[in-house]
Structure formats: C-alpha cells, structure tokens
Image (cartoon, rainbow, N blue to C red):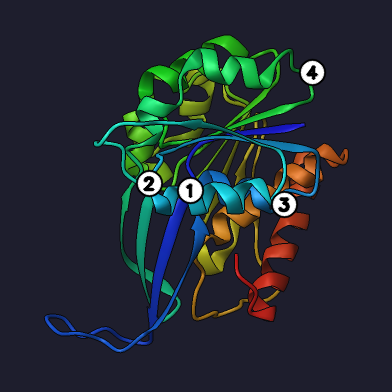
C-alpha cells in the first residue's frame, strides 16, 4: 500500500511559446485537479490511499466529488470563513516552468497527526508513506518520528524552498526526490554527506534533459534518457516519475531498475502528449 499525505489543488495552467511582460497573452489555458500529492496518488499502479484536506466552498466540493471518484481518499473538511480552496497557477513557456503560484494553506490546519494516524492504521514494513511539502512542519516531523523505520517514508517537495522549510525533520527517511540544482542548495553542495548525516539511503535528483542522478548508499549513478522529449507542457512530470518509481518498487524491482522503468514511462507519456 502507498499512503500519500498532501495537497490536492485546482490547477490552472497557461501554455505559450513565449510570454510578453506587462500585457495580456492569448494562451492555451487548461484547468483540473493537481497538486503534488494528488498527482502522485492518481498515477500510482498499486494499492493506494490519499489523505488530504479541503474547505467547504463550492470549488472545494467539486474537487471532493472528483477525488472520491478517483479511488481511496480520506478527506478532512475544514470549515470557517477563512478556509479557502487550494489553488495553483502555472505559466509554462517553451515547455518549461516560467513561474508558478500556489495557495495550499488549507492543508496545514486540516491535516493533523491523529487524523493521519487513524487513516493509516497499522502499516506493513514494505508500505510507503509519501509526504509532500505542503504539510505543516510539525505534522511532517511527527509523521517521520512515528513511521520512519516502520514503513518506507518518502519526501516529495516541489522546490528547494519547500524542502528547506522541513530541513530539520529530514532524518531516517527512505527516499527524497528533488531537482538537482535545488538538492545542491539544500545539501550545501554535498548530497552524499547529507545522506550520511541524515541516514537517508536514497535520493533521486531530476536533471531535465540530462535525465536522473540516483544517489545511493554506495554509489552515484547517472541515468540518461533514452530519448530527449521536448514537450510544450511538462507540468507534473516529476510527480509522474515518482508515482511510476513507487509502483515499480512495489512490484519488487530494485532502486536502479525502478528508476529506469519510471524514466521510460515518463518519456512515453511526454512523447504521447498525455497529461503528467
């Protein structure tokens, strides 16, 4: 079982070859469910459960209905006039992220340690607990303290800034995924020492067209893509990679083989033009 704890958001993504500053840009704009936690959950090919929080407004109710149609979800509803729907805006230029803005503040008051513990129950040693960085620092630290060593704990921040927010708690986890440049910043340029100091056996660093760098306990392995795909919109590709990686690990593959299999699936998805 893969338990994913994090945010679902209403994504608004604008795509254009080049955006002009200071003016309105006609663009290809699409909307739908997103968020790091949700995208990982929705792309898993293994038994899964998603734990998240939503407000009670009409937009959040639509998100709840869509979520409940997508599988095993446990939602904490947060009331009050200050509770807002989770929203994410991304501007994609020439296939890359130009800028993004998000408001997932509903997750911090909505997800608490007792709520998550009840939803997880008694895990098995080979189960996964995946946490995105929208959780409150106290909740993430509490989950690591509670479950590290009892199941395979995974941390999936969307940026280096998000990872640094939880820096002190990142100890004893099974796997962390992050863009290579942001990993260098988080670790002071020495990921291997960071792993040793924090007892983290695996880090997957994404490197764009260069592929993936896999940091393990004994080696660093660079895995190049079989084919470079220049897609107009790569939103969520890293989340899809992690979902495929977890599905492969759940099926019994070792880490290098699972990373390669996940990379192949991402390349197929991007080449087909499917959403990530």
Q: What residue is at 50 percent from the left and 54 percent from the top?
A: 62
**Residue 254 percent location from the top left of the image:** 81, 39
Asked whether the residues under the numbered discs 1 and 4 touch, taking CB atoms below 8 Å apart as contact, a structural biologist would say no
| CA–CA distance in space, label 2 to label 1 | 6 Å
Q: Residue 204 got which mark?
A: none
Q: Is residue 43 left or right of residue 165?
A: right
Task: Assign a secondary structure to mark 1.
Answer: helix
Looking at the image, residue 46 lies above or below residue 139? below
Q: What residue is at 40 percent from the left and 31 percent from the top?
A: 78
Asked whether the residues under the numbered discs 2 and 1 touch, taking CB atoms below 8 Å apart as contact, a structural biologist would say yes
Q: Residue 61 got which mark?
A: 1
Name the quadrant of the N terminus.
Answer: top right
Residues 34 and 154: in front is 34
Looking at the image, residue 99 lies above or below residue 108? below
Q: What residue is at 69 percent from the left and 51 percent from the top?
A: 70
In the picture of the structure, the residue carrying the numbered disc 3 is: 244
Sequence-wise, the earlier of marks 3 and 1 is 1
Residue 200 occupies quadrant:
top right
**Residue 49 percent location from the top left of the image:** 69, 35
Neighbour tally class for label 2: few under 14, some 14-19, many 20 plus, Cα within 10 Å: some
In the picture of the structure, the residue carrying the numbered disc 2 is: 57
Foreground mark, 2 or 3?
Answer: 2
In the picture of the structure, the residue carrying the numbered disc 4 is: 124
Foreground mark, 4 or 2?
Answer: 2
**Residue 229 percent location from the top left of the image:** 60, 78
Residues 17 and 217: in front is 17
Neighbour tally class for label 1: few under 14, some 14-19, many 20 plus, Cα within 10 Å: some
| CA–CA distance in space, label 4 to label 2 | 36 Å
Sequence-wise, the earlier of marks 1 and 4 is 1
Looking at the image, residue 74 lies above or below residue 13? above
Neighbour tally class for label 4: few under 14, some 14-19, many 20 plus, Cα within 10 Å: few
């Amino acid at each position: 079982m893969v338990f994913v704890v994090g945010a679902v958001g209403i994504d608004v993504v604008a795509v254009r070859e080049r955006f002009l500053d200071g003016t309105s840009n006609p663009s290809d704009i699409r909307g739908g469910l997103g968020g790091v936690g949700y995208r990982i959950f929705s792309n898993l090919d293994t038994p899964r459960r998603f734990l998240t929080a939503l407000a009670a407004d009409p937009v959040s109710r639509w998100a709840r209905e869509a979520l409940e149609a997508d599988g095993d979800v446990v939602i904490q509803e947060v009331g009050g006039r200050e509770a807002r729907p989770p929203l994410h805006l991304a501007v994609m230029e020439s296939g890359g992220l130009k800028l993004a803005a998000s408001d997932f503040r509903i997750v911090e008051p909505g997800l608490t340690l007792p709520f998550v513990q009840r939803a997880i129950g008694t895990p098995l040693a080979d189960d996964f607990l995946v946490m995105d960085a929208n959780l409150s620092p106290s909740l993430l630290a509490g989950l690591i303290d509670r479950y590290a060593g009892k199941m395979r704990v995974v941390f999936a921040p969307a940026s280096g800034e998000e990872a640094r927010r939880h820096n002190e708690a990142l100890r004893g986890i099974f796997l962390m995924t992050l863009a290579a440049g942001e990993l260098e910043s988080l670790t002071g340029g020495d990921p291997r020492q960071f792993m040793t100091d924090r007892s983290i056996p695996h880090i997957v660093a994404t490197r764009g067209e260069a592929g993936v760098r896999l940091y393990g306990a004994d080696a660093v392995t660079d895995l190049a893509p079989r084919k470079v795909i220049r897609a107009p919109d790569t939103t969520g590709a890293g989340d899809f990679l992690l979902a495929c990686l977890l599905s492969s690990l759940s099926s019994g593959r070792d880490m290098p083989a699972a990373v390669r299999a996940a990379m192949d699936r991402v390349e197929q998805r991007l080449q087909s033009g499917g959403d990530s």
